[in-house]
Image: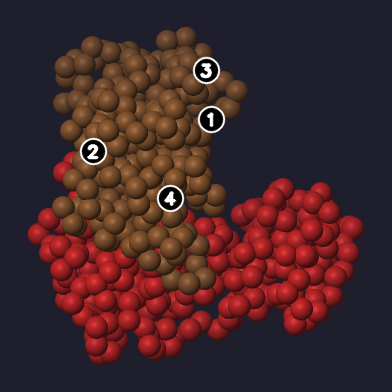
Chain colours: A brown, B red
Amino acid sequence: MAEVIDIDDPGDPRVDDFRDLSSADRRPDLPGRKGLVIAEGVVVVQRMLSSRFTPSALLGVDKRLEPLADDLADLDVPYYRASAEVMAEIVGFHLNRGVLAVAQRPAELTVDEVLDGARTVAVLEGVNDHENLGSMFRNAAGLGADAVLFGDRCADPLYRRAVRVSMGHVLRVPFAQMSKWPADLDLLRDRGFQIIALTPNSDAVNLATAMTGERVALLLGAEGPGLTEEAMRATDVRARIPMSPGTDSLNVATAAAMAFYERVRTS
Amino acid sequence: MAEVIDIDDPGDPRVDDFRDLSSADRRPDLPGRKGLVIAEGVVVVQRMLSSRFTPSALLGVDKRLEPLADDLADLDVPYYRASAEVMAEIVGFHLNRGVLAVAQRPAELTVDEVLDGARTVAVLEGVNDHENLGSMFRNAAGLGADAVLFGDRCADPLYRRAVRVSMGHVLRVPFAQMSKWPADLDLLRDRGFQIIALTPNSDAVNLATAMTGERVALLLGAEGPGLTEEAMRATDVRARIPMSPGTDSLNVATAAAMAFYERVRTS
Protein backbone atom coordinates (compact mmCIF):
# COMPACT_ATOMS: atom_id res chain seq x y z
CA MET A 1 0.00 0.00 0.00
CA ALA A 2 1.26 3.45 -0.91
CA GLU A 3 2.27 5.34 2.20
CA VAL A 4 0.18 8.46 2.79
CA ILE A 5 2.34 11.39 3.87
CA ASP A 6 0.77 14.72 4.74
CA ILE A 7 2.28 17.84 3.24
CA ASP A 8 1.38 21.11 4.92
CA ASP A 9 4.28 23.27 3.76
CA PRO A 10 4.22 24.05 0.00
CA GLY A 11 7.99 24.47 0.18
CA ASP A 12 8.54 20.87 1.33
CA PRO A 13 11.40 19.46 -0.80
CA ARG A 14 9.76 16.04 -0.97
CA VAL A 15 7.29 17.41 -3.52
CA ASP A 16 9.87 19.20 -5.67
CA ASP A 17 9.09 16.98 -8.66
CA PHE A 18 5.60 18.49 -8.79
CA ARG A 19 6.72 22.09 -8.58
CA ASP A 20 5.89 24.88 -11.06
CA LEU A 21 4.24 22.65 -13.65
CA SER A 22 3.30 25.50 -15.94
CA SER A 23 6.37 27.67 -15.52
CA ALA A 24 8.30 27.28 -18.75
CA ASP A 25 11.75 27.74 -17.27
CA ARG A 26 11.32 25.47 -14.29
CA ARG A 27 8.75 22.86 -15.26
CA PRO A 28 9.94 19.34 -14.57
CA ASP A 29 8.49 17.62 -17.64
CA LEU A 30 10.90 18.90 -20.25
CA PRO A 31 13.59 16.68 -21.71
CA GLY A 32 16.96 18.17 -20.83
CA ARG A 33 15.68 19.25 -17.43
CA LYS A 34 14.40 16.57 -15.12
CA GLY A 35 12.48 14.99 -18.00
CA LEU A 36 9.79 13.73 -15.68
CA VAL A 37 6.47 12.40 -16.89
CA ILE A 38 3.38 13.77 -15.20
CA ALA A 39 -0.03 12.08 -15.07
CA GLU A 40 -3.04 14.19 -14.04
CA GLY A 41 -6.35 12.94 -12.72
CA VAL A 42 -7.57 9.56 -11.54
CA VAL A 43 -7.98 7.95 -14.97
CA VAL A 44 -4.61 9.03 -16.33
CA VAL A 45 -2.87 8.09 -13.09
CA GLN A 46 -4.48 4.64 -13.37
CA ARG A 47 -3.22 4.34 -16.93
CA MET A 48 0.26 5.29 -15.81
CA LEU A 49 0.11 2.61 -13.11
CA SER A 50 -0.69 -0.01 -15.72
CA SER A 51 2.04 1.19 -18.10
CA ARG A 52 5.80 0.91 -18.38
CA PHE A 53 6.04 4.30 -16.62
CA THR A 54 6.46 3.59 -12.94
CA PRO A 55 5.59 6.54 -10.73
CA SER A 56 8.00 7.52 -7.99
CA ALA A 57 5.38 9.52 -6.09
CA LEU A 58 1.82 10.83 -6.13
CA LEU A 59 0.53 14.18 -4.92
CA GLY A 60 -3.16 14.58 -4.33
CA VAL A 61 -6.00 15.72 -2.18
CA ASP A 62 -7.53 13.38 0.36
CA LYS A 63 -10.63 12.53 -1.62
CA ARG A 64 -8.67 11.10 -4.55
CA LEU A 65 -7.31 8.36 -2.29
CA GLU A 66 -10.56 6.44 -2.33
CA PRO A 67 -11.06 6.05 -6.13
CA LEU A 68 -7.37 5.04 -6.35
CA ALA A 69 -7.44 2.64 -3.40
CA ASP A 70 -7.29 -0.56 -5.48
CA ASP A 71 -4.55 0.83 -7.71
CA LEU A 72 -2.42 1.90 -4.77
CA ALA A 73 -2.85 -1.32 -2.81
CA ASP A 74 0.31 -2.98 -4.13
CA LEU A 75 2.30 0.15 -4.75
CA ASP A 76 5.34 1.05 -2.70
CA VAL A 77 5.51 4.80 -3.36
CA PRO A 78 4.45 7.80 -1.27
CA TYR A 79 1.08 9.46 -1.75
CA TYR A 80 1.74 13.05 -0.69
CA ARG A 81 -1.58 14.25 0.64
CA ALA A 82 -2.19 17.99 0.61
CA SER A 83 -5.10 20.40 0.68
CA ALA A 84 -6.22 21.86 -2.64
CA GLU A 85 -4.67 25.17 -1.58
CA VAL A 86 -1.26 23.72 -0.73
CA MET A 87 -1.33 21.69 -3.95
CA ALA A 88 -2.08 24.83 -5.94
CA GLU A 89 0.92 26.55 -4.38
CA ILE A 90 3.18 23.63 -5.24
CA VAL A 91 2.13 23.11 -8.85
CA GLY A 92 1.52 26.80 -9.53
CA PHE A 93 -2.17 26.74 -10.39
CA HIS A 94 -5.40 25.24 -9.15
CA LEU A 95 -5.59 21.70 -10.43
CA ASN A 96 -9.16 20.50 -10.34
CA ARG A 97 -8.25 16.94 -11.25
CA GLY A 98 -6.90 16.74 -7.70
CA VAL A 99 -4.17 14.14 -8.15
CA LEU A 100 -0.84 13.82 -9.94
CA ALA A 101 1.69 11.07 -10.38
CA VAL A 102 5.27 11.57 -11.48
CA ALA A 103 7.56 9.07 -13.19
CA GLN A 104 11.09 9.05 -14.51
CA ARG A 105 11.39 8.49 -18.23
CA PRO A 106 12.23 4.83 -18.77
CA ALA A 107 14.63 3.74 -21.47
CA GLU A 108 13.17 4.48 -24.90
CA LEU A 109 11.70 1.59 -26.81
CA THR A 110 13.41 0.58 -30.02
CA VAL A 111 11.73 0.49 -33.43
CA ASP A 112 12.02 -3.28 -33.29
CA GLU A 113 10.26 -3.48 -29.96
CA VAL A 114 7.29 -1.35 -30.99
CA LEU A 115 6.86 -3.15 -34.32
CA ASP A 116 6.80 -6.58 -32.73
CA GLY A 117 3.34 -7.97 -33.40
CA ALA A 118 2.02 -4.64 -34.72
CA ARG A 119 -0.38 -4.64 -37.66
CA THR A 120 -1.15 -0.93 -37.90
CA VAL A 121 1.28 1.83 -37.05
CA ALA A 122 1.34 5.60 -37.52
CA VAL A 123 4.57 7.24 -38.61
CA LEU A 124 4.77 10.97 -37.97
CA GLU A 125 6.87 13.66 -39.62
CA GLY A 126 6.95 17.25 -38.38
CA VAL A 127 4.04 16.87 -35.99
CA ASN A 128 5.22 19.44 -33.49
CA ASP A 129 1.97 20.33 -31.75
CA HIS A 130 1.50 18.67 -28.36
CA GLU A 131 -2.26 18.73 -28.57
CA ASN A 132 -2.30 17.04 -31.98
CA LEU A 133 0.17 14.46 -30.72
CA GLY A 134 -1.98 13.76 -27.68
CA SER A 135 -5.14 13.44 -29.78
CA MET A 136 -3.32 11.13 -32.15
CA PHE A 137 -2.41 8.74 -29.33
CA ARG A 138 -5.93 8.87 -27.95
CA ASN A 139 -7.30 7.97 -31.37
CA ALA A 140 -4.68 5.27 -31.88
CA ALA A 141 -5.66 3.66 -28.59
CA GLY A 142 -9.39 3.96 -29.21
CA LEU A 143 -9.29 2.66 -32.77
CA GLY A 144 -6.79 -0.12 -32.30
CA ALA A 145 -3.60 1.19 -33.88
CA ASP A 146 -0.64 -0.62 -32.38
CA ALA A 147 2.24 1.85 -32.29
CA VAL A 148 3.52 5.27 -33.24
CA LEU A 149 6.88 5.95 -34.83
CA PHE A 150 8.50 9.36 -34.89
CA GLY A 151 10.35 10.40 -37.99
CA ASP A 152 11.71 13.88 -38.15
CA ARG A 153 10.88 17.04 -36.17
CA CYS A 154 8.10 15.85 -33.90
CA ALA A 155 7.25 17.26 -30.49
CA ASP A 156 7.85 15.38 -27.26
CA PRO A 157 4.95 12.98 -26.67
CA LEU A 158 5.68 12.96 -22.93
CA TYR A 159 5.14 16.67 -22.49
CA ARG A 160 2.48 17.22 -19.83
CA ARG A 161 -0.12 18.62 -22.23
CA ALA A 162 0.35 15.71 -24.64
CA VAL A 163 -0.09 13.18 -21.82
CA ARG A 164 -3.25 14.96 -20.69
CA VAL A 165 -4.85 15.36 -24.14
CA SER A 166 -4.06 11.72 -24.91
CA MET A 167 -5.95 10.81 -21.73
CA GLY A 168 -2.88 8.87 -20.70
CA HIS A 169 -2.64 6.79 -23.86
CA VAL A 170 0.86 8.04 -24.73
CA LEU A 171 1.86 6.00 -21.71
CA ARG A 172 0.33 2.85 -23.17
CA VAL A 173 0.54 2.95 -26.95
CA PRO A 174 4.17 2.08 -27.63
CA PHE A 175 6.27 4.59 -29.57
CA ALA A 176 9.82 4.86 -30.80
CA GLN A 177 12.06 7.36 -32.48
CA MET A 178 13.56 6.56 -35.88
CA SER A 179 17.15 7.66 -36.12
CA LYS A 180 17.57 7.99 -39.89
CA TRP A 181 14.76 9.76 -41.69
CA PRO A 182 13.29 8.77 -44.06
CA ALA A 183 15.81 5.97 -44.66
CA ASP A 184 14.56 4.05 -41.62
CA LEU A 185 11.26 3.48 -43.38
CA ASP A 186 13.13 0.52 -44.85
CA LEU A 187 12.96 -1.05 -41.39
CA LEU A 188 9.19 -1.15 -41.90
CA ARG A 189 9.45 -2.39 -45.45
CA ASP A 190 11.81 -5.17 -44.38
CA ARG A 191 9.16 -6.32 -41.92
CA GLY A 192 6.47 -6.49 -44.58
CA PHE A 193 4.69 -3.23 -43.88
CA GLN A 194 2.87 -1.52 -46.71
CA ILE A 195 3.88 2.13 -46.36
CA ILE A 196 1.10 4.60 -47.12
CA ALA A 197 1.43 8.38 -47.20
CA LEU A 198 -1.66 10.34 -46.29
CA THR A 199 -1.98 13.45 -48.41
CA PRO A 200 -4.77 15.78 -49.51
CA ASN A 201 -3.35 15.66 -53.05
CA SER A 202 -6.11 14.84 -55.52
CA ASP A 203 -3.80 12.55 -57.53
CA ALA A 204 -3.62 10.15 -54.61
CA VAL A 205 -5.78 7.04 -54.45
CA ASN A 206 -8.77 6.80 -52.16
CA LEU A 207 -7.82 5.76 -48.63
CA ALA A 208 -10.63 3.19 -48.57
CA THR A 209 -8.96 1.16 -51.31
CA ALA A 210 -5.31 1.89 -50.54
CA MET A 211 -4.77 -0.21 -47.45
CA THR A 212 -4.26 -3.67 -48.85
CA GLY A 213 -1.31 -4.90 -46.76
CA GLU A 214 -1.46 -7.30 -43.88
CA ARG A 215 0.74 -4.84 -42.03
CA VAL A 216 0.22 -1.14 -42.70
CA ALA A 217 2.26 1.94 -41.78
CA LEU A 218 0.46 5.26 -42.21
CA LEU A 219 2.68 8.29 -42.76
CA LEU A 220 1.24 11.57 -41.54
CA GLY A 221 2.69 15.06 -41.72
CA ALA A 222 1.83 18.27 -39.91
CA GLU A 223 -1.12 20.37 -40.90
CA GLY A 224 -0.14 22.95 -43.42
CA PRO A 225 3.19 21.71 -44.77
CA GLY A 226 2.18 18.04 -44.82
CA LEU A 227 4.75 15.39 -45.59
CA THR A 228 8.03 16.34 -47.22
CA GLU A 229 8.53 15.20 -50.80
CA GLU A 230 11.47 13.16 -49.58
CA ALA A 231 9.26 11.20 -47.19
CA MET A 232 6.55 10.82 -49.84
CA ARG A 233 9.01 9.27 -52.23
CA ALA A 234 9.95 6.65 -49.66
CA THR A 235 6.39 5.31 -49.48
CA ASP A 236 4.56 2.66 -51.50
CA VAL A 237 1.22 4.42 -51.99
CA ARG A 238 -0.16 7.93 -51.64
CA ALA A 239 -3.69 7.89 -50.29
CA ARG A 240 -6.22 10.60 -49.64
CA ILE A 241 -9.37 11.03 -47.62
CA PRO A 242 -12.04 12.32 -50.01
CA MET A 243 -12.64 15.97 -49.09
CA SER A 244 -15.12 18.58 -50.18
CA PRO A 245 -13.76 21.21 -52.58
CA GLY A 246 -12.63 24.47 -51.00
CA THR A 247 -11.91 23.01 -47.59
CA ASP A 248 -8.66 22.42 -45.78
CA SER A 249 -6.99 19.15 -45.05
CA LEU A 250 -8.20 17.56 -41.83
CA ASN A 251 -6.43 17.98 -38.54
CA VAL A 252 -3.64 15.37 -38.44
CA ALA A 253 -5.14 13.48 -35.48
CA THR A 254 -8.52 13.38 -37.23
CA ALA A 255 -6.97 12.16 -40.47
CA ALA A 256 -5.18 9.46 -38.50
CA ALA A 257 -8.45 8.47 -36.81
CA MET A 258 -10.08 8.10 -40.20
CA ALA A 259 -7.30 5.83 -41.39
CA PHE A 260 -7.37 3.75 -38.20
CA TYR A 261 -11.14 3.47 -38.54
CA GLU A 262 -10.87 2.38 -42.16
CA ARG A 263 -8.28 -0.16 -41.13
CA VAL A 264 -10.55 -1.66 -38.45
CA ARG A 265 -13.48 -1.66 -40.85
CA THR A 266 -11.69 -3.55 -43.60
CA SER A 267 -9.68 -6.04 -41.58
CA MET B 1 -12.75 48.76 -53.28
CA ALA B 2 -12.54 48.79 -49.50
CA GLU B 3 -11.30 52.17 -48.32
CA VAL B 4 -7.98 51.99 -46.50
CA ILE B 5 -7.97 54.18 -43.39
CA ASP B 6 -4.85 54.52 -41.27
CA ILE B 7 -5.22 54.14 -37.54
CA ASP B 8 -2.36 55.52 -35.45
CA ASP B 9 -4.15 56.00 -32.15
CA PRO B 10 -5.13 52.73 -30.43
CA GLY B 11 -7.93 54.66 -28.69
CA ASP B 12 -9.57 55.61 -31.99
CA PRO B 13 -13.32 54.92 -31.57
CA ARG B 14 -13.63 53.72 -35.16
CA VAL B 15 -11.96 50.44 -34.16
CA ASP B 16 -14.04 49.89 -31.02
CA ASP B 17 -15.54 46.69 -32.43
CA PHE B 18 -12.08 45.11 -32.37
CA ARG B 19 -11.26 46.12 -28.82
CA ASP B 20 -10.26 43.79 -25.96
CA LEU B 21 -10.90 40.56 -27.83
CA SER B 22 -9.68 38.36 -25.01
CA SER B 23 -11.01 40.32 -22.07
CA ALA B 24 -13.96 38.31 -20.82
CA ASP B 25 -16.00 41.21 -19.51
CA ARG B 26 -15.60 43.48 -22.51
CA ARG B 27 -15.07 41.22 -25.52
CA PRO B 28 -17.37 42.08 -28.39
CA ASP B 29 -18.13 38.55 -29.59
CA LEU B 30 -20.47 37.45 -26.81
CA PRO B 31 -24.22 37.20 -27.36
CA GLY B 32 -25.91 39.65 -25.04
CA ARG B 33 -23.11 42.16 -25.50
CA LYS B 34 -22.44 43.40 -29.00
CA GLY B 35 -22.70 39.84 -30.32
CA LEU B 36 -20.23 40.54 -33.10
CA VAL B 37 -18.63 37.83 -35.17
CA ILE B 38 -14.87 38.02 -35.58
CA ALA B 39 -12.85 36.44 -38.39
CA GLU B 40 -9.07 36.13 -37.94
CA GLY B 41 -6.47 35.67 -40.63
CA VAL B 42 -6.59 35.84 -44.40
CA VAL B 43 -8.27 32.50 -45.04
CA VAL B 44 -11.01 32.94 -42.45
CA VAL B 45 -11.64 36.53 -43.54
CA GLN B 46 -12.03 35.26 -47.11
CA ARG B 47 -14.50 32.65 -45.90
CA MET B 48 -16.47 35.32 -44.09
CA LEU B 49 -16.57 37.40 -47.25
CA SER B 50 -18.09 34.50 -49.17
CA SER B 51 -20.64 33.78 -46.42
CA ARG B 52 -23.91 35.23 -45.17
CA PHE B 53 -21.87 37.17 -42.57
CA THR B 54 -21.17 40.58 -44.07
CA PRO B 55 -18.29 42.36 -42.40
CA SER B 56 -18.75 45.97 -41.38
CA ALA B 57 -15.02 46.62 -41.13
CA LEU B 58 -11.57 45.05 -41.28
CA LEU B 59 -8.54 45.81 -39.15
CA GLY B 60 -5.16 44.68 -40.35
CA VAL B 61 -1.53 45.36 -40.99
CA ASP B 62 -0.42 46.70 -44.34
CA LYS B 63 0.95 43.45 -45.70
CA ARG B 64 -2.39 41.64 -45.40
CA LEU B 65 -3.87 44.03 -47.97
CA GLU B 66 -2.15 42.33 -50.86
CA PRO B 67 -3.37 38.72 -50.32
CA LEU B 68 -6.88 40.13 -49.80
CA ALA B 69 -6.82 42.51 -52.77
CA ASP B 70 -9.19 40.48 -54.97
CA ASP B 71 -11.58 39.89 -52.10
CA LEU B 72 -11.72 43.55 -51.16
CA ALA B 73 -12.13 44.81 -54.72
CA ASP B 74 -15.92 44.96 -54.64
CA LEU B 75 -16.32 45.61 -50.96
CA ASP B 76 -17.60 48.89 -49.59
CA VAL B 77 -16.26 48.70 -46.02
CA PRO B 78 -13.25 50.30 -44.36
CA TYR B 79 -9.95 48.46 -44.01
CA TYR B 80 -8.44 50.02 -40.89
CA ARG B 81 -4.72 49.77 -41.43
CA ALA B 82 -2.52 49.78 -38.35
CA SER B 83 0.95 48.71 -37.32
CA ALA B 84 1.27 45.38 -35.52
CA GLU B 85 1.95 47.34 -32.32
CA VAL B 86 -1.16 49.53 -32.57
CA MET B 87 -3.22 46.49 -33.49
CA ALA B 88 -1.93 44.64 -30.42
CA GLU B 89 -2.96 47.57 -28.23
CA ILE B 90 -6.45 47.58 -29.73
CA VAL B 91 -7.20 43.87 -29.58
CA GLY B 92 -5.29 43.32 -26.34
CA PHE B 93 -2.65 40.84 -27.52
CA HIS B 94 -0.27 40.31 -30.41
CA LEU B 95 -2.23 38.77 -33.24
CA ASN B 96 0.15 37.13 -35.65
CA ARG B 97 -2.56 36.44 -38.20
CA GLY B 98 -2.42 40.19 -38.88
CA VAL B 99 -5.98 40.81 -40.03
CA LEU B 100 -9.47 40.74 -38.57
CA ALA B 101 -12.93 41.29 -39.94
CA VAL B 102 -16.00 41.99 -37.85
CA ALA B 103 -19.63 41.34 -38.74
CA GLN B 104 -22.98 41.79 -37.05
CA ARG B 105 -24.87 38.59 -36.41
CA PRO B 106 -27.41 38.17 -39.19
CA ALA B 107 -30.89 36.78 -38.50
CA GLU B 108 -30.66 33.15 -37.44
CA LEU B 109 -31.50 30.52 -40.01
CA THR B 110 -34.54 28.38 -39.36
CA VAL B 111 -34.50 24.59 -39.13
CA ASP B 112 -36.42 24.53 -42.40
CA GLU B 113 -33.84 26.64 -44.15
CA VAL B 114 -30.87 24.54 -43.10
CA LEU B 115 -32.58 21.25 -43.91
CA ASP B 116 -33.51 22.33 -47.40
CA GLY B 117 -31.60 20.02 -49.74
CA ALA B 118 -29.50 18.56 -46.91
CA ARG B 119 -28.64 14.86 -46.97
CA THR B 120 -26.41 14.60 -43.92
CA VAL B 121 -26.79 16.71 -40.81
CA ALA B 122 -25.31 16.66 -37.33
CA VAL B 123 -27.58 17.32 -34.37
CA LEU B 124 -25.79 18.30 -31.17
CA GLU B 125 -26.87 18.03 -27.55
CA GLY B 126 -24.84 19.48 -24.69
CA VAL B 127 -21.75 20.23 -26.79
CA ASN B 128 -20.61 23.19 -24.75
CA ASP B 129 -16.93 23.32 -25.67
CA HIS B 130 -16.05 25.96 -28.26
CA GLU B 131 -13.08 24.05 -29.55
CA ASN B 132 -15.08 20.88 -30.10
CA LEU B 133 -17.79 22.91 -31.83
CA GLY B 134 -15.25 24.54 -34.10
CA SER B 135 -13.61 21.21 -34.96
CA MET B 136 -17.02 19.73 -35.67
CA PHE B 137 -17.79 22.44 -38.24
CA ARG B 138 -14.37 22.06 -39.80
CA ASN B 139 -14.94 18.33 -40.16
CA ALA B 140 -18.50 18.85 -41.44
CA ALA B 141 -17.21 21.17 -44.15
CA GLY B 142 -14.29 18.93 -45.08
CA LEU B 143 -16.29 15.72 -45.22
CA GLY B 144 -19.42 17.04 -46.90
CA ALA B 145 -21.97 17.22 -44.09
CA ASP B 146 -24.64 19.75 -45.01
CA ALA B 147 -25.80 21.36 -41.79
CA VAL B 148 -25.61 21.40 -38.01
CA LEU B 149 -28.61 21.61 -35.71
CA PHE B 150 -28.39 22.60 -32.07
CA GLY B 151 -30.57 20.81 -29.59
CA ASP B 152 -30.14 21.60 -25.97
CA ARG B 153 -27.26 23.21 -24.03
CA CYS B 154 -24.73 23.85 -26.76
CA ALA B 155 -22.12 26.60 -26.78
CA ASP B 156 -22.27 29.56 -29.12
CA PRO B 157 -20.80 28.54 -32.49
CA LEU B 158 -20.00 32.17 -33.30
CA TYR B 159 -17.71 32.66 -30.32
CA ARG B 160 -14.32 33.82 -31.57
CA ARG B 161 -12.49 30.63 -30.64
CA ALA B 162 -15.10 28.46 -32.35
CA VAL B 163 -14.83 30.53 -35.53
CA ARG B 164 -11.05 30.22 -35.47
CA VAL B 165 -10.86 26.49 -34.73
CA SER B 166 -13.44 25.84 -37.45
CA MET B 167 -11.14 27.71 -39.85
CA GLY B 168 -14.14 29.87 -40.72
CA HIS B 169 -16.45 27.01 -41.59
CA VAL B 170 -19.02 27.95 -38.93
CA LEU B 171 -19.64 30.90 -41.21
CA ARG B 172 -20.39 28.64 -44.16
CA VAL B 173 -21.92 25.40 -42.93
CA PRO B 174 -25.52 26.39 -42.16
CA PHE B 175 -26.78 25.86 -38.62
CA ALA B 176 -29.98 26.42 -36.70
CA GLN B 177 -31.28 26.17 -33.18
CA MET B 178 -34.11 23.79 -32.39
CA SER B 179 -36.60 25.32 -30.01
CA LYS B 180 -38.19 22.22 -28.49
CA TRP B 181 -35.79 19.48 -27.48
CA PRO B 182 -35.95 16.65 -28.25
CA ALA B 183 -39.50 17.04 -29.61
CA ASP B 184 -38.22 18.98 -32.62
CA LEU B 185 -36.47 15.84 -33.85
CA ASP B 186 -39.87 15.15 -35.37
CA LEU B 187 -39.17 17.98 -37.81
CA LEU B 188 -36.38 15.80 -39.15
CA ARG B 189 -38.48 12.65 -39.16
CA ASP B 190 -41.25 14.46 -41.04
CA ARG B 191 -38.72 15.32 -43.73
CA GLY B 192 -37.62 11.72 -44.13
CA PHE B 193 -34.41 11.79 -42.10
CA GLN B 194 -33.21 8.62 -40.48
CA ILE B 195 -32.24 9.70 -36.97
CA ILE B 196 -29.14 7.98 -35.61
CA ALA B 197 -27.73 8.39 -32.12
CA LEU B 198 -23.98 7.94 -31.79
CA THR B 199 -23.10 6.20 -28.56
CA PRO B 200 -20.18 4.16 -27.22
CA ASN B 201 -22.71 1.66 -25.79
CA SER B 202 -21.77 -1.85 -26.84
CA ASP B 203 -25.43 -2.77 -27.45
CA ALA B 204 -25.60 -0.32 -30.35
CA VAL B 205 -25.22 -1.46 -33.94
CA ASN B 206 -22.06 -0.84 -35.90
CA LEU B 207 -21.98 2.64 -37.47
CA ALA B 208 -20.87 1.17 -40.79
CA THR B 209 -24.17 -0.67 -41.20
CA ALA B 210 -26.49 1.76 -39.42
CA MET B 211 -26.76 4.56 -41.94
CA THR B 212 -29.27 3.24 -44.44
CA GLY B 213 -31.42 6.33 -45.00
CA GLU B 214 -31.32 8.61 -48.01
CA ARG B 215 -31.28 11.48 -45.52
CA VAL B 216 -29.41 10.98 -42.27
CA ALA B 217 -29.31 12.98 -39.04
CA LEU B 218 -26.50 12.09 -36.63
CA LEU B 219 -27.11 12.87 -32.99
CA LEU B 220 -24.00 13.58 -30.95
CA GLY B 221 -23.65 14.40 -27.28
CA ALA B 222 -20.80 15.87 -25.27
CA GLU B 223 -17.82 13.82 -24.21
CA GLY B 224 -18.39 12.28 -20.85
CA PRO B 225 -22.14 12.52 -20.33
CA GLY B 226 -23.03 11.66 -23.92
CA LEU B 227 -26.61 11.95 -25.13
CA THR B 228 -29.43 12.09 -22.61
CA GLU B 229 -31.68 9.06 -22.44
CA GLU B 230 -34.54 11.31 -23.49
CA ALA B 231 -32.75 12.23 -26.71
CA MET B 232 -31.73 8.62 -27.32
CA ARG B 233 -35.33 7.48 -27.09
CA ALA B 234 -36.31 9.97 -29.80
CA THR B 235 -33.98 8.37 -32.35
CA ASP B 236 -34.47 5.52 -34.83
CA VAL B 237 -31.14 3.72 -34.38
CA ARG B 238 -28.30 3.68 -31.87
CA ALA B 239 -24.95 3.25 -33.56
CA ARG B 240 -21.43 2.90 -32.32
CA ILE B 241 -17.93 3.28 -33.64
CA PRO B 242 -16.07 0.07 -32.82
CA MET B 243 -13.57 0.94 -30.09
CA SER B 244 -10.78 -0.95 -28.38
CA PRO B 245 -11.56 -2.22 -24.89
CA GLY B 246 -10.41 -0.02 -22.02
CA THR B 247 -10.37 3.20 -24.00
CA ASP B 248 -12.60 6.24 -23.81
CA SER B 249 -15.17 7.36 -26.31
CA LEU B 250 -13.72 9.52 -29.07
CA ASN B 251 -13.75 13.27 -28.96
CA VAL B 252 -17.15 14.40 -30.27
CA ALA B 253 -15.71 16.16 -33.32
CA THR B 254 -13.67 13.06 -34.18
CA ALA B 255 -16.68 10.80 -33.78
CA ALA B 256 -18.64 13.12 -36.06
CA ALA B 257 -15.83 13.05 -38.62
CA MET B 258 -15.93 9.26 -38.60
CA ALA B 259 -19.66 9.28 -39.24
CA PHE B 260 -19.37 11.88 -42.01
CA TYR B 261 -16.58 9.83 -43.57
CA GLU B 262 -18.65 6.66 -43.41
CA ARG B 263 -21.53 8.54 -44.99
CA VAL B 264 -19.37 9.73 -47.91
CA ARG B 265 -17.92 6.25 -48.33
CA THR B 266 -21.26 4.50 -48.54
CA SER B 267 -23.28 6.99 -50.57
Same chain, marks 3 and 2?
yes
Residue A185 shows up from this direction: yes
Tell me which numbered mark, 3 or 1, is placed earlier along the sequence.
1
Label 4 – label 2 distance at C-alpha: 25 Å
Tell me which numbered mark, 1 or 2, is placed earlier along the sequence.
1
Q: Assess whether mark 2 and mark 1 are in contact (beta carbons under 8 angstroms).
A: no
Tell me which numbered mark, 4 or 2, is placed earlier along the sequence.
2
Front one among A142 and A6: A142
For residue A252, which numbered disc appears in the image?
4
Check disc 1 and report the residue beneath it. Answer: A22
- Please name the amino acid that badge 1 sits on: Ser
Q: Chain of mark 3?
A: A
Tell me which numbered mark, 1 or 4, is placed earlier along the sequence.
1
Front one among A138 and A191: A191
Mark 1: which secondary structure? Answer: loop
Check disc 3 and report the residue beneath it. Answer: A32
Q: Chain of mark 4?
A: A
Q: Residue at x 58, y 81 (%)?
A: B52
Same chain, marks 1 and 4?
yes
- Please name the amino acid that badge 3 sits on: Gly
Same chain, marks 4 and 3?
yes
**B201 with respect to A151 (left or right):** left
